[in-house]
Image (cartoon, rainbow, N blue to C red):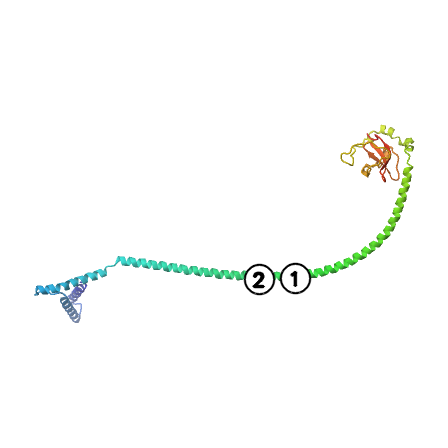
C-alpha cells in the first residue's frame, strides 16, 4: 500500500509539472518514464485473475493471503509494543538505581578513606606534639635537676659553715654556762644562808608583841572603815572544797598560799609588816600568816573580813 501511494504521488506530480509547463521537456519525459515503470512494476506485483481457470485461482490464492499477512505483519511491526517498552523502562530504572547505589557506595568508601586519612593525620599530629612535649618536659626536668643539685651543693656549704659556727657558739656557751654554774653554786650557798636566817627569824616570830602595839589595833579601825574589810567572795583553789577552821601549826597546800591570795599591803588592814618567808594570806574570812617555804601556819586571825 505504501508503494502504491508513492507511485500515485509521483504520477500526479509529473502531470502537474507537465500541465503548468514549469519543467523542461527532458524532465517531463523522465517523469513519464518513471510513471510507466512504476505502473509496470505494480501490474507485475498485482495477481492476475483474468482468463484463468479455477485451479489457477486456487493456486494463486495462497499468494494473496501471504501478501495480506505480510502487510499485517508489517503493520503489527510498526505498532509499538507497550509491554516490551514497560519492561525496558523498568529495566532501565533498575539499572539507574543500581548505578546510583553503586555511586553512593563508592562515595561512602571515598568518605571512609578520607576519614581514615584524616584520623591518621590527626594521630601523627598528636603523636608529634606529644613527643615534642615529652622532649620539652625531659629537658625541663634535666634543667631543674641541675638547678636542684647546684642548690643542694650551695645549701650543703652553708650548712657546714653554720654547723661550724654553731659548734663554736656551743663551746663558748658551755664555757659561759660553766662560769654561771660556779656563780649559781655561790648563789645557792647564799640562798641557803638566807633561808637559814629566815628560819631563825621565823622561830623568833612573837604572836603577842604586835597585838600589844596600838598601831595594829585592827578592830577599832575596822569599826570605823567597815567597807575596807568587805573585799568580795572567796574562791577556793579546789572545786568542791569547803571551809575548815585551821589553827597554828597546820600545814597548807601550796595552792592555798599562792600569790593570788597574798595581802600585799598589810598596813591597809592595820596588820604588821612581815619579813623573810612570811606572807599574810586570806583564807575565806580568816587571815593566816604562812611560811611560804614550808606551808606552816604561824599566826591566824579568825573572822577578819566581813
Circle 1 residue: 143
Determine the secondary structure under disc 2: helix
Q: Is residue 273 shown left or right of residue 234?
A: right
Percent x, y of residue 197: 91, 41
Percent x, y of residue 160: 76, 59
2 vs 134, nearest the viewer: 134
Q: Identify which residue is drawn at 83% across, 54% down.
A: 174
Q: How many marks?
A: 2
The image quarter in which residue 191 lies = top right
Q: Identify which residue is drawn at 29% across, 58% down.
A: 87
The label on residue 167 is none
Q: Is residue 34 shown left or right of residue 293?
A: left
215, above or below 181, in the image: above
Q: Distance between the residues labelled 2 and 1?
A: 18 Å
Circle 2 residue: 131
61, above or below 191, in the image: below
Q: Furthest-front residue in view? A: 250
The image quarter in which residue 259 lies = top right
Q: Identify which residue is drawn at 35% across, 59% down.
A: 96
Amino acid at each position: 500500500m505504501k508503494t502504491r501511494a508513492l507511485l500515485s504521488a509521483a504520477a500526479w506530480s509529473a502531470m502537474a509539472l507537465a500541465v503548468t509547463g514549469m519543467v523542461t521537456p527532458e524532465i517531463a519525459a523522465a517523469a513519464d518514464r518513471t510513471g510507466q515503470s512504476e505502473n509496470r512494476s505494480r501490474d507485475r506485483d498485482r495477481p492476475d485473475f483474468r482468463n484463468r481457470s479455477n485451479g489457477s485461482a486456487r493456486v494463486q490464492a495462497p499468494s494473496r493471503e501471504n501478501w495480506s499477512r505480510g502487510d499485517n505483519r508489517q503493520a503489527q511491526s510498526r505498532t509499538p509494543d507497550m509491554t516490551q517498552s514497560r519492561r525496558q523502562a523498568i529495566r532501565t530504572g533498575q539499572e539507574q538505581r543500581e548505578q546510583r547505589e553503586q555511586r553512593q557506595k563508592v562515595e561512602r568508601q571515598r568518605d571512609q578513606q578520607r576519614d581514615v586519612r584524616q584520623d591518621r593525620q590527626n594521630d601523627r599530629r598528636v603523636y608529634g606534639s606529644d613527643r615534642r612535649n615529652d622532649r620539652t618536659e625531659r629537658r625541663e626536668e634535666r634543667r631543674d635537676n641541675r638547678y636542684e643539685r647546684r642548690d643542694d651543693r650551695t645549701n650543703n656549704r652553708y650548712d657546714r659553715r653554720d654547723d661550724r659556727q654553731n659548734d663554736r657558739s656551743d663551746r663558748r656557751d658551755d664555757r659561759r654556762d660553766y662560769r654561771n654554774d660556779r656563780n649559781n653554786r655561790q648563789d645557792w650557798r647564799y640562798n641557803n644562808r638566807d633561808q637559814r636566817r629566815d628560819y631563825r627569824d621565823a622561830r623568833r616570830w612573837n604572836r603577842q608583841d604586835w597585838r600589844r602595839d596600838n598601831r595594829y589595833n585592827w578592830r577599832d579601825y575596822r569599826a570605823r572603815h567597815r567597807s575596807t574589810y568587805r573585799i568580795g567572795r572567796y574562791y577556793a583553789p579546789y572545786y568542791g572544797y569547803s571551809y575548815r577552821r585551821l589553827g597554828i601549826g597546820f600545814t597548807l597546800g601550796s595552792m592555798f598560799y599562792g600569790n593570788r591570795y597574798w595581802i600585799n599591803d598589810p598596813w591597809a588592814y592595820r596588820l604588821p609588816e612581815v619579813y623573810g618567808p612570811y606572807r599574810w594570806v586570806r583564807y575565806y574570812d580568816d587571815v593566816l600568816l604562812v611560811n611560804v617555804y614550808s606551808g606552816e601556819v604561824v599566826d591566824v586571825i579568825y573572822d577578819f573580813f566581813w
